[in-house]
């Protein structure tokens, strides 16, 4: 990983790709560790509508969380292997906990006749 990255331009809102090449969400927020006298460092990428809701105006946050839920997955920055037009990860979406929504959706869709 490069020593310096413009997070807002190169990471935020980028598609996440797991180690098997599957799309597994978007970077909705970035968690930074900072302590006085130390350099700020990215600790986690936050994935989930609840994380994205924090960037919305206050009245809309409640609505988004009510509709989409409040689940946030914290992906350790150490799992990022490459940043390009996408953010590539070193593990699978299942290992990182990013496949839960997909599994819930597939169970729901399986109930629809002809799906």
Image: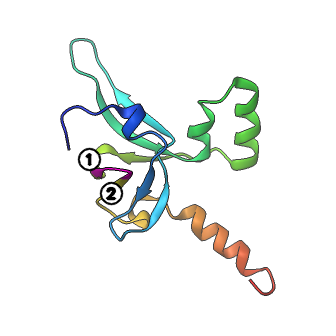
Vertical comparison of 59 with 111: above or below: above
Vertical comparison of 8 with 77: above or below: above
Where's residue 65, x and y in %? 70, 41
The mark nearer the N terminus, 1 or 2, is 1
Secondary structure under badge 1? helix
Task: Report the quarter where the N terminus lies.
Answer: top left
Q: Is residue 85 magenta?
A: yes
Q: What span is in magenta?
A: 82-86
Q: Which residue is mark 2?
A: 89
Q: Which residue is mark 1?
A: 78
* View extreme (top): residue: 37
Where's residue 41, x and y in %? 28, 29
Q: Residue at x 51, y 64 (%)?
A: 99
Q: Nearer the viewer, mark 1 or mark 2?
A: 2
Q: Residues within 10 Å of mark 2 (few under 14, many from 20)?
A: many
* View extreme (bottom): residue: 114
Image quadrant assignment for residue 115: bottom right
Q: Residues within 10 Å of mark 1 (few under 14, many from 20)?
A: few
């Amino acid at each position: 990983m490069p020593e310096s990255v413009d997070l807002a331009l190169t990471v935020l809102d980028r598609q996440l790709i797991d180690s098997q090449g599957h799309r597994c969400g978007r970077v909705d927020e970035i968690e930074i560790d900072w302590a006085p006298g130390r350099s700020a460092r990215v600790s986690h990428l936050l994935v989930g509508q609840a994380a994205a809701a924090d960037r919305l105006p206050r009245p809309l946050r409640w609505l988004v969380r009510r509709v989409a839920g409040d689940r946030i997955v914290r992906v350790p920055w150490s799992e990022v292997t490459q940043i390009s037009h996408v953010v590539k990860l070193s593990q699978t979406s299942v290992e990182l906990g990013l496949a839960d929504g997909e599994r819930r959706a597939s169970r729901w869709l399986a109930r629809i006749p002809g799906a």
